[in-house]
Image (spheres, rainbow, N blue to C red):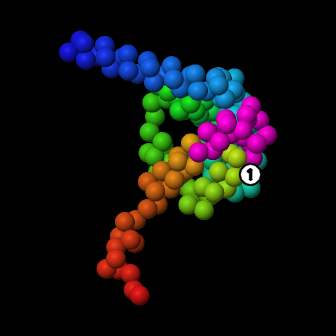
Amino acid sequence: MTTEIQGRAVHLAGIRERAEAEMERVGIDAAFIERLVDTFYGRIQAHPRLGPVFDGRLAGRWPDHMEKMKRFWSSVAFKNGAYGGKPVQAHVGVEGIAPELFPEWLALFSETLGDIAPSDEAKTWFMATAERIAKSLTLSLFYNPALDDPARKTE
């Protein structure tokens, strides 16, 4: 059992080291993660459609959310386990959340990366990751498999 646990720890350390090396190669560090989160969520708050949805959920709790998002993106980029939350559950029941807001969220994220990403590779990596996250959340929150039932479709 101890050997298995040690093997897993070595494996996880290797994943973390490779992620850190990749992020360093494209110019990503902890300071960039902070700047990305601060800049992006500042823009979210000012956005005419996204701002009210986020503020409805986070009013009075923005500083906590910002720290959580810094841990989230650090965990995603560096594979360091800094975030241990449940993103889908955190978005369930958010008043005003709708599938059509996710493309706006992605567009704002892309604009932010275009303004501050240290390299094209960093922008590409973060956008691909954000697109996967948006797709996952959209499917988790709004997908109804019954709507894809071939028996319900008319020709």
Q: Is residue 135 above or below residue 116?
A: below
Q: Is residue 133 above or below residue 151?
A: above
Judge whether residue 80 can be spotted in this image.
no
Q: Is residue 124 above or below residue 47?
A: above
What segment is highlighted magenta in the picture? 111-128
Look at 51% across and 23% down and name the residue there: 18
Look at 38% across and 71% down and name the residue there: 148
Q: At which x and y percent is residue 31? A: 69, 23
| Magenta span contains residue 52 | no
Q: At which x and y percent is residue 83? A: 49, 29
Look at 60% across and 55% down and name the residue there: 102
| Magenta span contains residue 116 | yes
Q: Using the image as rendered, state which of residue 87 and residue 96 is in the foreground.
A: 87
Outermost residue on the bottom side: it is 155
Look at 38% across and 16% down and name the residue there: 10
Element marked by disc 1: loop
Q: At which x and y percent is residue 28? A: 66, 27
Q: Residues within 10 Å of mark 1 (few under 14, many from 20)?
A: some
Q: Amino acid at mark 1?
A: His
Q: Quadrant of residue 77?
A: top right
Q: Is residue 93 above or below residue 74?
A: below
**Lateral position of residue 141 relative to residue 107, left or right:** left
Q: Which residue is the site of mark 1?
A: 47
Location of the C terminus by quadrant is bottom left
Q: Quadrant of residue 145?
A: bottom left
